[in-house]
Image (tube, grey):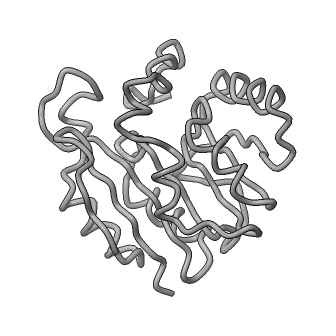
């Protein structure tokens, strides 16, 4: 595990009322225009902040990928409690997503790309698993000092990430700032 990775002992931070108010998962998922038969991949799924609401929007598969077994174990319990039969837990890194190419209609990458080393490889993998025309929802920390979040040297400036998306076949359709600390990118695979 690299020093960039989120530590499972802090998982309570991932799902709290303040965060839900600022970044409501159901509302943000609307940006993907999820259809009833779409397949989704939640990269760095963590506690299921997006996995669980996404599973209610499609009858098809939602792959919850995380590099940390403890996170997947916790998410597995939540999935079981909610009797969701369309969520599949996958242990793996974003730099080497263990799924076939062009499998997903949508990819979610929430507060996780700053952990990817090298970023280019992670973006290539996102593009590889997306179907042509598929969409990405990405939320990240802006590269500025804040009380919460990863160290400044791990963060990616919003315009830099948007440029990297474009360079990897992911056309940025939307770049917004839900707060002064965060930014949100919606991108579409062009080929």
Residue 78, quarter of the rendered image: top right
Badge count: 0
Question: Residue at coordinates 52% horizontally, 65% vertically from top-left?
Answer: 32
How far from the left and from the top, in percent, is residue 101? 67, 71
Q: Is residue 70 above or below residue 47?
A: above
Describe residue 21's horizontal placement relative to residue 105 as left or right. Answer: left
How far from the left and from the top, in percent, is residue 185? 34, 60
Residue extending farthest left: 145
The residue lying toward the viewer, choosing from 82 and 90, is: 82
Question: Residue at coordinates 12% horizontally, 37% vertically from top-left?
Answer: 144
Q: Is residue 14 above or below residue 115?
A: above
Question: Residue at coordinates 44% horizontally, 30% vertically from top-left?
Answer: 5
How far from the left and from the top, in percent, is residue 19? 39, 30
Describe residue 171's horizontal placement relative to residue 62 as left or right. Answer: left
Question: Residue at coordinates 54% horizontally, 19% vertically from top-left?
Answer: 8
The residue lying toward the viewer, choosing from 9 and 175, is: 175
């Amino acid at each position: 595990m690299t020093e960039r990775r989120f530590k499972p002992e802090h998982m309570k931070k991932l799902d709290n009322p303040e965060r839900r108010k600022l970044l409501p998962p159901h509302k943000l998922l609307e940006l993907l225009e999820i259809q009833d038969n779409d397949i989704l991949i939640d990269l760095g799924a963590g506690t299921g902040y997006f996995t669980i609401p996404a599973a209610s929007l499609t009858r098809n598969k939602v792959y919850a990928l995380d590099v940390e077994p403890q996170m997947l174990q916790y998410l597995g319990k939540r999935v079981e409690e909610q009797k969701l039969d369309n969520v599949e837990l996958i242990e793996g890194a974003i730099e080497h997503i263990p799924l076939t190419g062009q499998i997903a209609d949508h990819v979610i990458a929430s507060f996780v790309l700053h952990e990817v080393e090298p970023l280019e490889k992670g973006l290539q993998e996102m593009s590889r698993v997306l179907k042509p025309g598929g969409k990405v929802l990405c939320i990240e920390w802006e590269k500025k000092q804040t009380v919460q979040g990863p160290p400044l040297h791990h963060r990616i400036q919003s315009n830099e990430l948007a440029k990297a998306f474009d360079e990897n076949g992911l056309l940025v359709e939307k770049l917004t700032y839900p707060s002064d600390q965060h930014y949100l990118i919606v991108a579409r695979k062009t080929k």
